[in-house]
Image (spheres, helix red, strand yellow):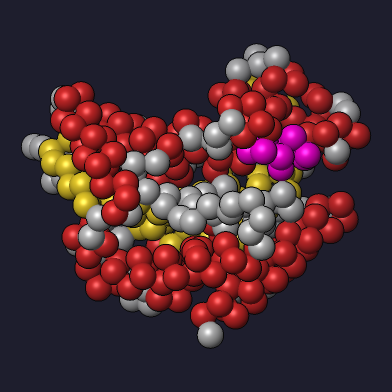
Amino acid sequence: MSKNAVRVLVTGAAGQIGYALVPMVARGAMLGPDQPVILHMLDIEPAAEALNGVKMELIDAAFPLLKDVIATTDVVEACTGVDIAVMVGGFPRKEGMERKDVMSKNVSIYKAQASALEKHANTDCKVLVVANPANTNALILKEFAPSIPEKNITCLTRLDHNRALGQISERLDIQVSDVKNVIIWGNHSSTQYPDVSHATVTSSDGQNPARELIADDQWLRTEFIKTVQQRGAAIIKARKLSSALSAASSACDHIRDWVLGTPKGTWVSMGVYSDGSYGIPSGLIYSFPVTCEKGEWSIVQGLKIDEFSRTKMDATANELIEEKSLAYSCLN
């Protein structure tokens, strides 16, 4: 028996990430190879013509799972009846702009989009915020969509998680699929803490701690962390454009694991609403290690936190507290 189509909203759909993301959704990379989808694509008025071009390409690609495409600049039309919302659109920081200016622009965008989701999306809509500052944009969205359960509002740190897996696989010259359970703690910013303390590597003789195999704590505590933290900037320098393909792929990974579940014994990193776990203040959207089952995520509990990790985790929490304060000041 064929499944009912799932309605997936992608905002900023005519942009770089959106353009990379929508064919992945249509092909089944996000929700599985047997799940039909209806794509809702939203962008701003100046991008309307480009957005229509993306719609034409989706039609031309003849994706069997794609049942319909709605391309619009109307936020109400875009949000109506959606089951999953991937919030890619946002105001980018431009040269000479202060942080508060960017925050102010994004607060107004996310306030408007949250209100539309609140009124018109399905009540159990799952939301993933990709646009930066992702954690704080997600927090603003939560404030203005109070009927959407707080567990349904998340932000993307899976890109950083995947970057960390990639760095370890390159260092050890192994398949990335053999590395698991890295953690990204905190903010999707340069204060995030990529942590390999609990990561493992699968080989012919079973699972071994990644830290033991790397056998270079100096590298793990300096260059590895910095590379993951600064990877986005390095890609901009090389490509003259920000990460798009990897961001889109990671957004698919995030939603797929959330909806379909994480493999047994494996956790992933998601920016979620803190409940006070690991001493992180509640009321922040903070990246934790999570497992997912039956459409619900749970923070992995009981991990041992050493002094080095504690310092890094607290530093990124403090930045999020500052960002929250700045965002709320823009509301007044």
Question: Where is 315 relative to 263, above or below?
Answer: below
Residue 125 placement (x, y as % from top left): 30, 61
Residue at the bottom extreme of this rendering? 332
Q: Quadrant of residue 200?
A: top right
Q: Position of residue 214 (x, y in %)?
A: 81, 25
Return the x and y of residue 87 as percentages of the image width and height. 40, 54
Residue at 64 percent across and 76 percent down: it is: 325
Q: Residue at x 57, y 48 (%)?
A: 157
Looking at the rendered structure, the number of numbered marks drawn on it comes to 0
- Whether residue 85 is visible to the viewer of this picture, yes or no, is yes
Residue 314: x %, y % from top left:
77, 63
Q: Quadrant of residue 286?
A: bottom right
Can residue 276 be seen from the camera position used here?
no
Asked whether 46 falls inside the magenta stretch, the response is: no
Of residue 312 and residue 97, the one placed in the foreground of this image is: 97
Residue drawn 19% across and 60% down? 77
328 and 268: which is toward the camera: 328
Pick the front one: 303 or 332: 332
Q: Which residues are magenta?
A: 225-233
The magenta stretch spans residue 230: yes
